[in-house]
Image (spheres, grey):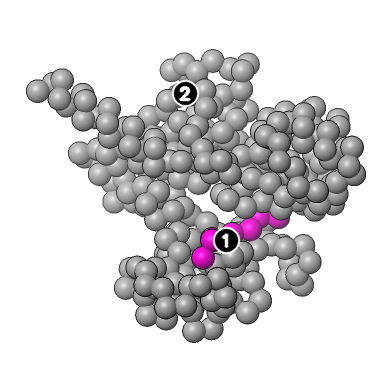
Amino acid sequence: LFYEGGFTVDSTCRVVSEYGITNMAGSPTAFRLLLAARDEVEGKIKGRLRAVSSAGEPLTPEVIRWFSSGLGCTIHDHYGQTELGMVLCNHHALSHTISIGTAGYAMPGHRVVVLDEQQRELEPGEPGMLALDRSRSPLLWFSGYVGTKTKAFVGDYYLSGDTVEMNADGSISFVGRSDDVITTSGYRVGPFDVESALVEHPAVIEAAVIGKPDPERTELVKAFVVLHASHRGDEALAEQLQQHVRQRLSAHAYPREIEFVSELPKTPSGKIQRFLLRDREKTVQQQTAAVAN
């Protein structure tokens, strides 16, 4: 069943119930909104789903845990691009075990590696760029990519533009788009880790984290946070959220600034558009500097 209507919690529960849906695919944004209405959703569809798949952005740990405990099914995270197809997955039909909280493993027939800035292959646990070994992997040649000139092709590799880490078991953990990774006081901070920590707080529905230009730190970590209607965004809550993140991540990773917003900019498929938030911050800084001068 392909549902073309706009996403709402009510429509999702209705479609699952009326049509007997047992295998569902959607975006992380949709699943976060289901989590925000957990009591209603559990009352309507708990126990109905056998398999759930997600792609587009990484799933936060809170969503993964809730699908298991609240709805009684495992949610499977996957990774792909238009040029690649779905090259990493936790598909329930494959023989390997599911690696919860990761994008999964390379699809059969693909060789996926993690590279440093000199295109050298890295060992597990070292962050770098996700790449596909073109000499030993299909790359949608049937779609007209043969002979295509692109900066993404370097030597034998296709460079994804995404920063990841390979785990000891061969699964891949997503860190962030290379242009989303924040450099602050000499440290590299993945926005996903900070966002995941923020949404574990009961006041938060969703969050987006960016690097705000800063003359001392290069960038400082700034978070845009959407709250549940029952909470008010004030200085006290901002400080509480900062401490919440500091307790879970390194001291350099907590957001130095928090701005409460009613919604986050997203693509039609539900991906958070962090670059729009970065552009907005740069514009504000430029306007402030112009007024000061």
Circle number at residue 159: none
Q: CA distance from mark 2 to mark 1?
A: 31 Å
Residue 282 position by quadrant? top left
| Residue type at the position of mark 1 | Gly
Is residue 80 inside the magenta stretch? Answer: yes
Residue 3 location (% of width, % of height) = 75, 42
Q: Residue at x 52, y 27 (%)?
A: 263
Q: Secondary structure at mark 2?
A: strand
In this view, the residue in front, 80 or 288, is 80
- Does label 2 or label 1 sit earlier along the sequence? 1
Circle number at residue 260: 2
Whether residue 254 can be seen here:
no
Q: Secondary structure at mark 1?
A: strand
- Give the residue pinned by disc 1: 80
| Residue type at the position of mark 2 | Phe
Classify the position of the C terminus by image quarter. top left
Q: Which residues are magenta?
A: 76-83
Is residue 217 inside the magenta stretch? Answer: no
Q: Between label 2 and label 1, give the one nearer the viewer.
A: 1
